Image: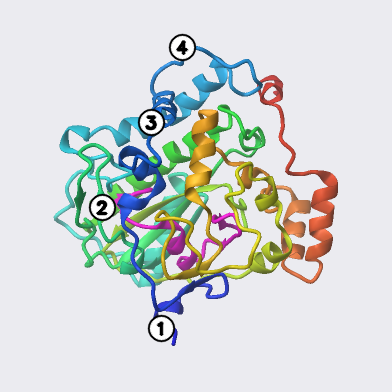
Amino acid sequence: MKNEQNNHNLDSENFEILDNFERFDQKNDVFRRSWWDQKIKSKKTELFYSTYREPLKTWKKADGFTQKDYALRNAAWHVSDILTEINVDQDRREGFSDAFSIQTPVAENKIHLGTKDEASKEIKKVSKAFGAGLVGITKYDSRWEYSNKFSDISLRSYPPEIPENLKNVIVVALPMDYDLVKTVPSALSGSATGLGYSHDALTVLSVTQYIRNLGYEAIGSMNDTSLAIPYAIQAGLGEYGRNGLLITQKYGPRVRLGKIYTNLDLSHDKPIHFGVKEFCNICNICASECPVKAIPFDAPSDVTYNQSNISGVRKWSVDGEKCFSFWTAQNSDCSICIRVCPYNKDYSKSINRIGMRLAGTLLRNLILWIDLKLKNGKRQKSSNWWKAD
């Protein structure tokens, strides 16, 4: 019998928690495995990581992989990289392996922000002022916290670092540049990812410091400490898609996520439903377009391809080993499943907002047919991005 208490905060139709659920060990994340697991670690992975820090000795002539493309990609990652490496002498890679610790102390005087709803409204306003595209708030949930942490530097495991008294989690989504994503796969498109993380770090650190300045505890986090997508679903930012990503109403799957844990009293948002599961059921574009077939064509299931999948959840799961192998093969991160997704649109345009609404109705087959007919997910040349005004 399913634990109803555990399921009430998630869309159980496409992210269903089963009785055999187990918390995820950070050591098994495919990126962490690339540092210690000989099945993943190779000269290709070493070259892949080094290209984000050091100039390549040779450059490809292929569109999107020139020195200029890599130069922009690495520049986009620069701010995020500086923050990640600021405490490496303390065996910490903040934002990716460890939560941020580069904050000033909590103010002694505590400022009251009114009711929980009033406090939440203010935090959302401040988060958006600091650059967040979407903001939601949910409760601390130990299921999504890593069972153990893992250091890429010392290759040691250690206990989780977020105290349970920080009972509220603010989840922010930062959009990735639409035009850059259209050039996937390319080194140039990696600029969208890097900018997303650099902006994410700015927003998370700023909101965290604001809360600490108010006299409350707060810890900022990006891809460290916990699984971000379940928290984002619980916070009402979007639904879970076939490509294993969060699908939002404002940006589709084109977002990067950050979290702030705090003891500031806040009201919680509820999960939303706008038809993603129903649309993904009839759409296999991301699975068809994935070069290494890492995305499933089947219905959501509890299948695990390898140790980099969560155990005890019925959902669409991506084969992380296959996915990462393509990243290293092309020497840049891949977002093909984002580019081709019919939800990946510029929603500042009213026609796309109408299409989003219709995709959640019985007209979803028509919307999918139109998307395929218009070839909305077609790759754009990186050279065209450079030439555009």
Indicate the quadrant containing the C terminus: top left, top right, bottom left or bottom right. Answer: top right
The image shows residue 284, relative to residue 61, as above or below, that is below
Label 3 crowd bin: few (<14), some (14–19), many (20+), radius 10 Å: some
Disc 3 marks a residue whose amino acid type is Val
Q: Please give the label number shown on residue 57.
A: 4
Circle 4 crowding by C-alpha within 10 Å: few under 14, some 14–19, many from 20: few
In which quadrant of the rendered image does the N terminus lie?
bottom left
Q: Are marks 2 and 3 in contact (CB under 8 Å)?
A: no
- Determine the residue positioned at 40% across, 79% down: 19
| Residue plotted at (59% across, 53% down) | 295
Q: What is the number of the mark on residue 79?
A: 3
Query: Of the residues shown, which amino acid type is indicated by label 2?
Result: Lys
Numbered disc in front, either 1 or 4: 4
332 versus 383 height, above or below = below
Secondary element type, mark 1? loop
Q: Residues within 10 Å of mark 1 (few under 14, many from 20)?
A: few
